[in-house]
Structures are given as structure tokens and as C-alpha cells.
Image (cartoon, rainbow, N blue to C red):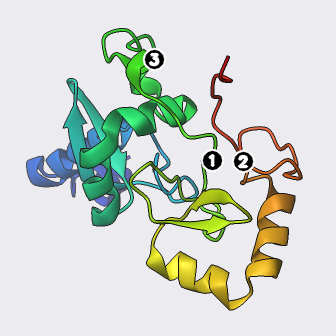
Amino acid sequence: MKAIFKKFIAPITPATFGLFLVASTASASADNKMCPIMIEDEVDIEEFVEFSGKKVYLCCEKCVDMWEKRAKYFIKSSPELLPQFKGMEKELELDKVELLPQKFCPIYKGHIITPDSPTIEVKGKKVYFWNKTAIRRWNRNSGGSLKKALAAGVLPQFAENKKVAGKANPVKKAK
């Protein structure tokens, strides 16, 4: 028993115990485990914002900047990734936030776009992109890019878009 104490318990000092508590508290309080903007990326607990009294963890500084410009848009677009806001829809006035039908960049398919995202016109329709690099990649093979994006279901503004659950925003049809 003394050997176990010396090997495992005695080395625990107040400082190491404090570090353990800080680390476990930080990870336990992260209601969202995946970035709500680059949805395939895990969060970095050092990249977070406070919004309406809740902590939102993001994956990088770019996502922090984007969140600060359009927080409510991301909450409404991906509520499943942000459980800390469940039940706050009225308080946050999410009914006033208009979502685009297109949810994801057609090149970086795990990146959510917003009305502020760069666009180009494709076959008479506006297509949103994550950034200008994505547009350059699209333009290298626009026909192939369009075909891949339609097959992935990320361009709901086109009739030939494959219907894939979760790949488009739920939007109200115009009357």
C-alpha cells in the first residue's frame, strides 16, 4: 500500500491538482464540441466567444471573427452544433434571421457560408463560397465543380441538386 501511495498519490501537489481541475472544467464546459462554422473541425478551447451569457467554442481565429459578424445566423443555421442555445430562439429573435437556402461552400463542403460570403453567378444563380480561394478552385474546373457540388447536395438553388439531409438550410418558400 505504501508503494502505491508513493508512486501515485504522493506526487499530486496542490499545483498539479489545480491544473487537473482547470483542464477538466474547460473541456466539460464546452457545450459544443465541433466548430459551428467549420463543422468538421473540433473546437480549440482557447478560441471562444461569449454570446448571450454562453460560451461558444470555435476552431480558429477566422471562425471567431466570422462568429462576431453573424452569430445569430450560425445559431439558426446549425442549432444541433450549439446545444447551449436550445430554448433561446425567441430571446435571440432568431425568427428575424433569414437563412440562405445554400448552407455550405461548394468547394469546402464542411464550411458554412453566410450572406456576406463571396459569390459568383453560375447558370443564372448566385452561388456562395467560403472565400476567394474557393472561387479560384471552382473556376479551375467549373463544370466538374458544379457536378460534384450538385451530387453532394450543397446547391439547393439548382433543381438538379441531390437532396441530402442537413446540406441545405430550412427556408420558407415565397408565397
Asked if the residue at tag 2 contacts the one at tag 1, i.e. Cβ–Cβ closer than 8 Å, the answer is: yes
Is label 1 in a helix, a strand or a loop? loop
Q: Amino acid at mark 2?
A: Gln
Quick check: 49 above or below 123? Answer: above
Q: How far apart in space, not on screen, are marks 1 and 2 (Cα)?
A: 7 Å
Q: Which residue is mark 2?
A: 157
Residue 132 horizontal side relative to residue 44, left or right: right
Q: Nearer the viewer, residue 54 or 112?
A: 112
Where residue 86 is drawn, which disc sits there? 3
Q: Amino acid at mark 3?
A: Lys
Q: Which residue is mark 1?
A: 102
**Image quarter of residue 28:** top left
Residue at x-position 60% and y-position 47%: 103
**In the image, which is nearer the foreground, mark 3 or mark 1?**
1
Indicate the position of residue 92 as horizontal and vertical percent values: 32, 18
Indicate the position of residue 148 as horizontal and vertical percent values: 82, 69
Q: How far apart in space, not on screen, are marks 3 and 2 (Cα)?
A: 28 Å
Indicate the position of residue 138 as horizontal and vertical percent values: 65, 80
